[in-house]
């Protein structure tokens, strides 16, 4: 079931995907041995994956009992959205201001490809996971264009939580197609070189996301 290459990373990706898709549920206690047997590996790569996911805020460990999926609270989502607005809002303005630079042009091409992938997945619920990944990639490209290692590190730390919340919110609300149109508007404003309009489109997207998640952008 698991290839004999980089067990640690493969177990990590397996557990992460299972958490994001809701296959591992909150309120259930799991064990290292359970997944070592399931994936036909030793307990070591499972333990390492659990530690990594715990550090990312996805799991919590219960002493002498096992581990479980950590719930994503409304407060968590509100704080993450606020952090995203601060980081992506700045990054988006940076992208528009520097759009004529060759490195930023490459990012814009990547955003266009990402948007095309999203459109291909948006109408088909069987590709919901793939759509979610393309959705998150779109936002991460905006942050990465700044070249700011601190912003990227913070964004990477939030990414798994964002993926979990995005997967659930899009799936529950059947929001893929609408979110895809919101991305398209952001991209169009980037291409027009209108910094304020691009920021406005992004904020509208965040507002819609907050509504689906049952929270608000500001306290």
Image: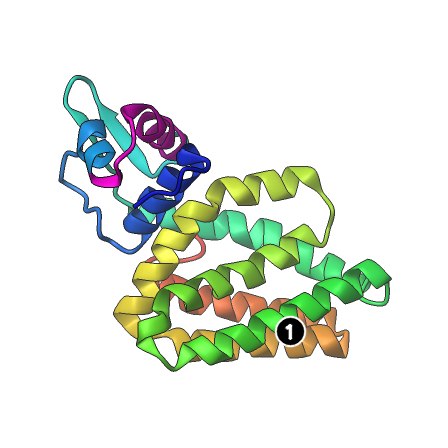
Residue 162: where, in percent of width, then height?
42, 52
Residue 60: where, in percent of width, then height?
27, 30
Disc 1 is placed on an element classified as helix
User: Vertical placement of 201 versus 40: above or below?
Assistant: below
Question: 199 and 142: which one is in front?
Answer: 142
Residue 139, image quadrant = bottom right
Q: Seen from this angle, which residue lies furthest top?
A: 64
Which residue is depicted at the point 80% across and 63% down? 97
Q: Residues within 10 Å of mark 1 (few under 14, many from 20)?
A: some
Magenta highlight range: 38-54
Question: 77 and 170: which one is in front?
Answer: 170
Residue 102, image quadrant = bottom right
Which residue is depicted at the point 29% across and 26% down? 42
Give the residue number, with chain letter if any, for mark 1. 112
133 left or right of 155? Answer: left
Q: Seen from this angle, which residue lies furthest right?
A: 101
* Residue 100 is inside the magenta segment: no
Residue 91: where, in percent of width, then height?
68, 55
């Amino acid at each position: 079931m698991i290839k004999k290459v980089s067990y640690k990373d493969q177990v990590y990706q397996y557990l992460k995907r299972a958490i994001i898709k809701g296959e591992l549920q909150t309120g259930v206690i799991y064990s290292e041995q359970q997944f070592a047997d399931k994936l036909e590996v030793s307990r070591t790569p499972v333990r390492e994956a659990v530690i990594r996911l715990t550090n990312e805020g996805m799991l919590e460990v219960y002493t002498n009992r096992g581990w479980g999926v950590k719930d994503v609270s409304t407060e968590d989502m509100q704080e993450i959205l606020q952090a995203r607005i601060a980081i992506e809002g700045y990054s988006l303005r940076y992208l528009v201001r520097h759009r004529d630079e060759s490195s930023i042009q490459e990012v814009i091409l990547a955003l266009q490809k990402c948007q095309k992938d999203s459109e291909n997945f948006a109408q088909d619920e069987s590709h919901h996971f793939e759509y979610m990944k393309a959705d998150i990639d779109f936002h991460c490209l905006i942050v990465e264009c700044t070249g700011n290692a601190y912003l990227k590190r913070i964004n990477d730390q939030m990414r798994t939580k964002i993926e979990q919340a995005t997967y659930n919110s899009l799936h529950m609300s059947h929001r893929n197609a609408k979110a895809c149109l919101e991305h398209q508007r952001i991209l169009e404003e980037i291409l027009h070189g209108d910094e304020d309009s691009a920021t406005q489109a992004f904020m509208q997207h965040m507002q819609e996301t907050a509504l689906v998640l049952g929270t608000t952008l500001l306290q």
